Each structure stands twice: as structure tokens, then as C-alpha cells.
Amino acid sequence: MKHVSKMIAVIGMAAALSGCKEGKGDFRYTVDQFADLKVMRYKVPGWEELTLGQKEYAYHLAEAAKYGRDILWDQNCKENLRIRHAVEAVLENYSGDRACPEFKDFEVYSKRLFFSNGMHHHYAEDKFFPECPREYFEGLLEAVGKADKDLVEIIYNPDIYPQRRFNGSTGDIVKQSAVNFYEGVSRDEVEAYYAGIMDPDDPEPVSYGLNTKVVKGEFFFQYACAAAVVKGEDGVIRELPWKVGGIYGPAIEKICGELALARECAENDIQKRALGLLIEYYNTGDLRKWDEFNIEWVKDTIGTVDFINGFIEDYNDPLGRKASWEGYVNIKDMEASRRTEILSENAQWFEDHSPVDPRFRKETVKGVSAKVINAVCLAGDSYPSTPIGINLPNADWIRKEHGSKSVTIANITDTYDFSAQEMPTSTLKEFAWSEEEIALEKQWGSIADNIHTDLHECLGHASGQLLPGVSGTALGEYASALEEARADLFGLYYVADPKMVELGIIPNMEVYKAGYSDYIRNGLMVQFTRVELGRPNTEAHMQNRKLIAEWCYEKGAADGVIVRRERDGKTYFTVEDYEALRGLFAELLAEIQRIKSEGDYEAGKALVETYAVHIDPALHKEVKERYEALDLKPYGGFINPEIRPVRRGGKVVDYEMVYGDDYLGQMLEYGRKYGTL
């Protein structure tokens, strides 16, 4: 999912959290800004300390990750690659006036397209449009020999593919979503199909449908660059696998080639076995092999270099079943990992003291592996926009029987901080009620955020258990928001526990107060800077935060736990009783864990629809106006550094890390080098 017994001196732990970051120096982190987006570049601390073999391993893993780029574009909408190829042709070949306002508008559209891996906003999921006139866009395509009026109609018509993942309250969420996971089928047909093949009593259930497209009837499908065409039978529903020889075959062949090279220089035998299983899975499409790979991958807790590669997260699927392609390469931050190792070693204590019904706790927490990492390469669903923490694998039975890996991504969070320091204004000063609140956030906010992320990823996602016979997909389209809320609440509850000071994780009990104030301020107000006026709140992580903040605001209203204030025509929310708020977090955590453990779809739906979706229009308008006056961008993403082989005498003697600053250049280079579909 995307978010220790040894005693360590509090002062040393605080230094590890906030005082050991590599400074900015002359390195500028922000490289581009446009529309509602900011693009940054990140450093990779620890790269020079790797051995040549470790660098080579990371290099091939990064190449494998980049070769999956086209897969995600096609998954997001079947017209995305066609649009991207046309846009790339203009950017690389147009010889007309590039300084005119119309071409500048075209460039902005191109940058937005690349950022979102398609024509739908990466977060809000609504279709966005070029600001240059339609006739001008058509002229650009004609000028480079790519005239295509049908394509321009797709780009400009608001009624064609209006949402990547349909979020309306009425209608068929499968048929009305632009994602390329289904064709010719309805929601009812898909759910009936999987109900017919799933075995609810299987103690090791397969993640049915994770790596397939579901189609029906007279259907022709060309496997990307391959020549095979499949014709379906009338009324027959079937799955087409994403594998070598199947959909995305050419891209997956490239991925497997680089994974095989990585396997030759892996750090240990566990990594070699895991890579072998992953390659076998890609060749067969067999989800049992995917499970075997994840079980082996979880075992590798000693390697310095690690990776993610595959069809993993199901946030983009309206039914929460199909997985988007994702790649990630990272190296362990040895110093910062001390705090996550403490949490990992004490995982059983946290599980035993969780405020949920004992029936829903794990009797024995197995294999919770936690570390702090530095990203080396982002790819697929993690590029350019990336999470700051990850906990995998997602299969509940694997978590229960074999454990999970949890990571907090240090150099990404550091980059956000350093980039914010480059800006002349801040949301904190605008939306915080008092100077005391601002001072508390500045002193402890960064530590609180890091610890909450650690708890969310290391322990939150790994906590709890399903009751026998409950399916992991029982919560349907509400599963993602509820799962993120569950993990967030786990972190919010425990960041305020005295055990955190006892373990040396936080220096004092002021830290959690900064975290609580920031969470409520963001959940009730600040995050809505990302949502267009008049639109609902639809992204799973934003729904999670709104659900928690709104529920606690309502339930604590009579006791004044959270207070809404006004000053000079501006609205503020302040936490007045931190202990009572912690009690509300515990109450909501217990309920959401019950919902997940019992598979209570209706209760989960009621929570999300009541508290997570609808935004007060007057407050929304105010927040947008206040934020726009700050001239900041609400969304951030990244370009990757380049790992460049250094050759002497025909041999590779090193791999250097090169930090570029050309966002559009990297996007075009990736299209030339890694385009396979």
C-alpha cells in the first residue's frame, strides 16, 4: 500500500530524524512549475558508498522499471499512447513559431499529459484540456505529418472519457471509467464472473484478476506491437493476461531482459530466487507465481538495494481488483532506518495494545520488516508523482503468514522540504490560527510527519486480520479509502502513545500535538486546494484524510475537541483537546478495522459517502482563493537522476549518478528509449 527493543538516546534519535539531512547547498530542487504542478529533482544519498556490484544491480533494476512506462499509459486509457506519440512528434519536429502564446499553451498541455501519464489528472482523475484552440492543435499535427481529426476530437470533447475512474453516485462505474481494464462488460457482469471463479475457503487466495483485462463478445484485440489478434465469442466473458506473449508482451519482454541481468549481480541468493520467480510470473501470467515471488521478496531484509516491479496497486480500478504497473528502485538509509527497526522489533506490542476488538488483532505478528530508504529510480505509477511511504505485499494472507516490508522514503520527503524552502510563501502561515501553532509545527512538524508515515506503513497496513471467509475485495470501490484511513488512524493513535518516548522514537509528547494540528488542518481545509471548485473529493488518500477529520470534528463538537474559528473573514480549525482527539481516533480505528475484518460493505460505504466525498462549497471557495494568493502549486512530482555507466578500456568501472534538470527533456528521452507499445 501507498503513504525495537534497543533503547536509543532521545537526543540521538531526534538528530537522526531532523538534523542529519544533507543540506541544500547550491543544488536547486525545483526544476519546473506549470498549471497546478511543481516538478522537482532529488538527490540519492549513499550512492557513492555502494560497491560496483550494488550499483550495477541498481542500474539494471532501474532499466527494468523504465521499460514498464508504456504499460501504465495504456492502462490509464487506451487512447493515451496514441495522444502521447502525437504530442511527442510535435515537440520534437515542429519547426514553426515556438514562442507564440498558443504553442506555450500546447507545451503546458504536453507537460500535464506527461505528468499524469495520460489525459486525466493524476490525482483528481478528471480529464484536462489544452488551452490552445482546437484548430491550432490540428495545425500542429498536420505540420509534423500526424494529422488526425478523430484524435483531436478525443482530446477536446469533454464527453469522451471524462473521468479516468468514474466517481459519480449513479451509473455503471465500470462502463463509465476511462481505465483500460475492462471492455464490453458491466460492473454486474464482472462481479458475477469473479464470484463464479473465486474460492472463499482457500486459505491462500489468489488475487483474481490482478493482471488481466476482462472482455466480452465480438472483440478484437491486438497485443500492442505483436501481430496476434483475438476474436471473442458472443456473450462470453474472459480474461486476457498481461504477460510475455499476451497484452503488453513487448514491454514485459524488455523488463524481463533487464531483470535477468540484475539477477546475475544480485547481492544475495534470496534476491536471485525472487527475481527468478518474478521473471517466471511475467512469462506465465500465473498469479500463484506472483504470490511465490512476494513471499521470497519479503525475506530479503539484509540487502542494501531493493526494488518494486509489477502490477501492484489497485487504486485506479473502479472495482479495486486490477493493478496498475509500478516500478521503484531504492537503497537503504542505514542511519535513518534505526527508528523503523525499533518499530519493527516492537510490532507485537503495538498489535496487542491496539484499540480494536481482540478478534481482529493478529495473535502473532510475523516478519514486519521496516526501513528508511532513498529512491534511486521512480517508474510507472510512482512517476513522476510518488508516495512517501510503501508497505507491501498487499495480499492479506501473505502479510499474516509471511510478513511485509515497509519503507519510508527519506530523500523524497527531504526534497519536498527543501523545495518548499525555495518558495517565498507557505500554507502553514496562511492556514494556522496562531503563532504558537506555527512555532509548534516548525519545531516538531517534520518529525511528527516522518513518525506518522513510519507507523502508517510499518505497522498500520500490516496490522489486523480478516475473519475467516472474508474476501480481501469485500469492500469494493471503498476499499482503498478505508484501508488508507485504517493505516492513518493506527499511526495517529500511536504517535501520541508514551511508548514512543520510552522507545526513543520521539523526544517528547509535544511532537504528536504538532502532528494532530497539522492533520486536522489539512483534512478539513488545506488539501482541498487540490480539488476543482464544484467537484467532489475522489482520491483515496484525500478521502481518507477528510473522513477522519470530518468524523472527529462532528463527534467531538459537543465537547469542543476541534473548534472552527474565524478572523478577518478567514476560517481556521484548531485542536483544543488533544487527548480527547486521540480517543476519537481510537474509536474510529476500531470501527474501520471491524468493517474490514467483517467485510461490512454497507457500513464502509456509509462512512465514505457521509464524511469523505462532499466538500462544503463556501469553505472550498475560500480555501482555493487563499491558496491561489500564495502562488504555490498543490501537486509535486519528480524527474529521475540518470545512472550512467562509466567505461574504461571497454569495461564498466563505475556507475555515476547524474542530476539533470530538464523535465520535458527527460520525458521525451524516455519516450525514445523506453517506448515499446
Image: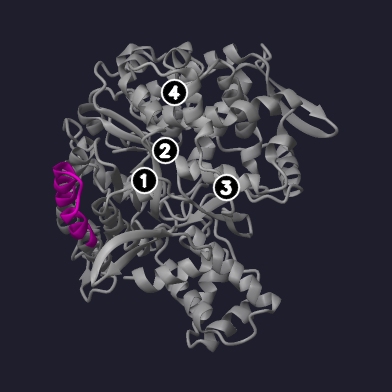
Label 4, secondary structure: give it: helix
How many angstroms separate mark 1 from mark 4 (CA)?
22 Å
**Image height of 357 relative to 177, above or below:** above
Label 1, secondary structure: give it: loop
Q: Is residue 616 visible?
A: yes
Farthest front residue in view: 649
How far across and how far down the image is residue 200, in percent?
A: 20, 33
Q: Amino acid at mark 3?
A: Lys
Provide the residue designation for mark 4. Answer: 490
Labelled disc at residue 236:
none
Whether label 2 touches label 4, CB < 8 Å: no
Task: Give whichever of discs 3 and 1 has the lower sequence position.
Answer: 3
Return the residue nearer the eye: 87 or 43. 43
Provide the residue designation for mark 2. Answer: 480
Q: Residues within 10 Å of mark 1 (few under 14, many from 20)?
A: many
Task: Give whichever of discs 1 and 2 has the lower sequence position.
Answer: 1
How far across and how far down the image is residue 442, in percent?
A: 65, 30
Provide the residue designation for mark 1. Answer: 314
Q: Amino acid at mark 1?
A: Asp
Residue drawn 59% across and 12% down? 580
Q: Residue 547: within the magenta?
A: no
Task: Give whichever of discs 1 and 4 has the lower sequence position.
Answer: 1
Whether label 1 touches label 2, CB < 8 Å: yes
What residue range appears in magenta? 258-277
Main secondary structure along the magenta-highlighted residues? helix
How many angstroms separate mark 3 from mark 4 (CA)?
33 Å
Q: Residues within 10 Å of mark 2 (few under 14, many from 20)?
A: many
Labelled disc at residue 24:
3
Q: Amino acid at mark 2?
A: Ser
